[in-house]
Amino acid sequence: MRKFITLLLLLGLVTFATPQQTYAQSADNTEVAAEEAGGLQLLKKYFIQGDWRFMSLVLVCLILGLAFCIERIITLNVASTNTTKLLAKIDDRLKEGDKAGAMEVARSTPGPTASILYEGLKNAEDGPEAVERAISSYGSVQMGLLEKGLVWISLFIAIAPMLGFMGTVIGMIQAFDRIEAVGDLSPSVVAGGIKVALLTTVFGLIVAIILQIFYNYIVSKMDSIVNKMEDASVTLVDMLATNNVFRR
């Protein structure tokens, strides 16, 4: 995870630190390439015009926030299990009276849903109450693992616009200092200073919006997994009762 974050950080800094060159093969390709590069060049232009101290911090927030988002998305996608097929395999083993085989199916299947089903099967001999307690306790552990890293994403969502606002306030102070030094309320001095000051806020808000979209997707993915876990837990208790596993 640390190597992944470091790599993204270096790539982001190189992207904004090195000038981009456009090579064209023909007149049409030159025009298309120039249009495609125009947006990035404009973004880099405004990034450089802003206060580099705060703009760099906002960029770091974006890169680190995206690193945590990508890591969570990959982890949650891996954790997603076809609950229907898993329960069908477990039910087949229980109908055959092969509780050990059902436990092996749950243990060999990746994901939090399979893990809590395994814990439930392991405590089946102690009765339905023991199964429910085991599922509830281990479900809390799995929830903590699913939520790992979300606090950092929330931090970057909150801190990016705050850094932007701080850069704006300091930029406004510097603009008024220049006005005081010149001794004349020139529109060019005022407009230029305010423009540079507001750029940090714009970039901070853009970073917060991007990370918020990823955050909401991650939360919705987690809710889907949790719902599947709860449904699978109820279904498991019913299957154990139907196949008279509690009486054995």
Image: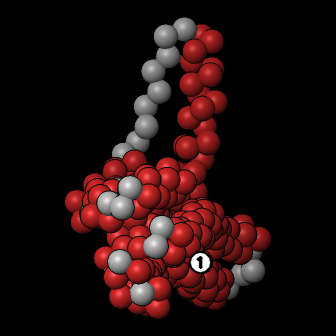
Residue 174: x, y in percent? 57, 83
Quadrant (top left, top right, bottom left, bottom right) of the C terminus: bottom left
Quadrant (top left, top right, bottom left, bottom right) of the N terminus: bottom left
Which residue lies at the image location 27% right of the left edge and 64% below the top edge? 100
Residue 62: x, y in percent? 47, 65
Please name the residue that numbered disc 1 is placed on. 161
Viewer can see residue 65:
no
Which residue lies at the image location 36% right of the left edge and 73% below the top edge? 121
Residue 60: x, y in percent? 41, 68
Q: Nearer the viewer, residue 3 or 14?
A: 3
Q: Is residue 13 above or below residue 19?
A: below
| Residue 181 occupies quadrant | bottom right
| Residue 190 occupies quadrant | bottom right
Which residue lies at the image location 34% right of the left edge and 51% below the top edge? 11
Q: Nearer the viewer, residue 163 or 159?
A: 159
Q: Provide the secondary structure element on which disc 1 rests.
A: helix
